[in-house]
Amino acid sequence: MIGFCSIQAFAQPIKMPAPSPEQKITQAFGMGTIELTYSRPNIKSRALFQANSELAPLGKLWRTGANAATRIHFSDKVTIGGKMLDTGTYVLYTIPGKEFWDIIINTGVNNWGTDGYKEAEDVVRFTVKAEKFGTPMETFTMQFANIQRETCDLRLVWGNTTVRIPISTNTKDRLRAQIDKALNADPVNPNVYQPAANFYYEWDKD
């Protein structure tokens, strides 16, 4: 009986913290939400963003994080890199460069890292400028910033490098259409007048 208990005790798995913990971010934006799921590696004194570095070497496809490919989900239509993306889940790949990065939105949502990547599955590819970040960031970090009514930035920061991915959406025209329809109803719901007035004042400056 003692031996059996000992075997049972040693059979229990040891739970260790993930070396590159996963983070999920949900950001309300426009008339929908953006959900980002990625894993956050640390530099740990390794070479970063160099020609043959161990981490995210220059000129090579990067999963933009660790482990599984970074996934981004849009509950509403957005525009990235000059192209409108429909609702759904995509993969975010990047190709780091000294001065500019290639940003790639791809449909390979089941890819593990860059394994299985197919250029034919790219939805949009564009270039953004890489900038210097004042305080070194040990842990790879992605965050939404500069959130306005129809625009926001997805910022990537690691080491002394940061890049900004602009995202936009069409909110104003759709709001105007909703308000026009509500004001032309017969009869008009009295609760419509206040939000309609707010829209014309704040959005149309009328």
Image (cartoon, rainbow, N blue to C red):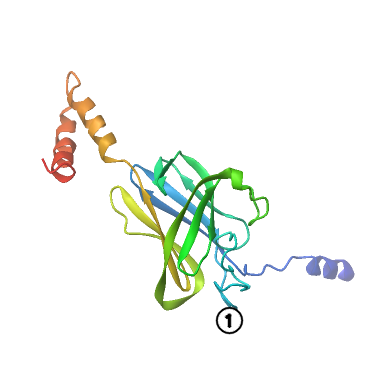
Q: Is residue 28 left or right of residue 15?
A: left
Kindly give the residue lying farthest to the left in the view shown: 206
Looking at the rendering, which quadrant does residue 200 occupy? top left
Q: Quadrant of the C terminus?
A: top left
Residues packed near mark 1 inside 10 Å, few (<14), some (14 to 19) or many (20 plus): few
Residue 195 at x, y percent in the picture: 18, 38
- Tag 1: amino acid: Ser
The one nearer the camera, 181 or 111, is 111
**159 and 8: which one is in front?**
159
Is 185 located above or below residue 93 in the figure? Answer: above
- Residue 108 visible here: no
The picture places residue 199, in percent across and down from the top left corner, at 18, 40
Q: Secondary structure at mark 1?
A: loop
The quarter of the rendered structure image containing the N terminus is bottom right
> Pointer 1: what residue?
45
Q: Position of residue 60 (x, y in %)?
A: 60, 62
Rendered residue at 81%/65% (across/down): 8
Foreground of the two, 128 or 106: 128
Q: Quadrant of residue 20?
A: bottom right
Above or below, 52 relative to 195: below
Residue that appears at 41% across and 73% down: 132
> Disc count in the image?
1
In this rendered view, identify the residue nearer to me: 65 or 75: 65
Furthest-bottom residue in this view: 45
- Residue found 67% across the figure and 54% down from its top: 115
Is residue 189 visible from the viewing direction of this image?
yes
**Left or right, residue 15 beside residue 61:** right
Left-right relation of 116 to 177:
right
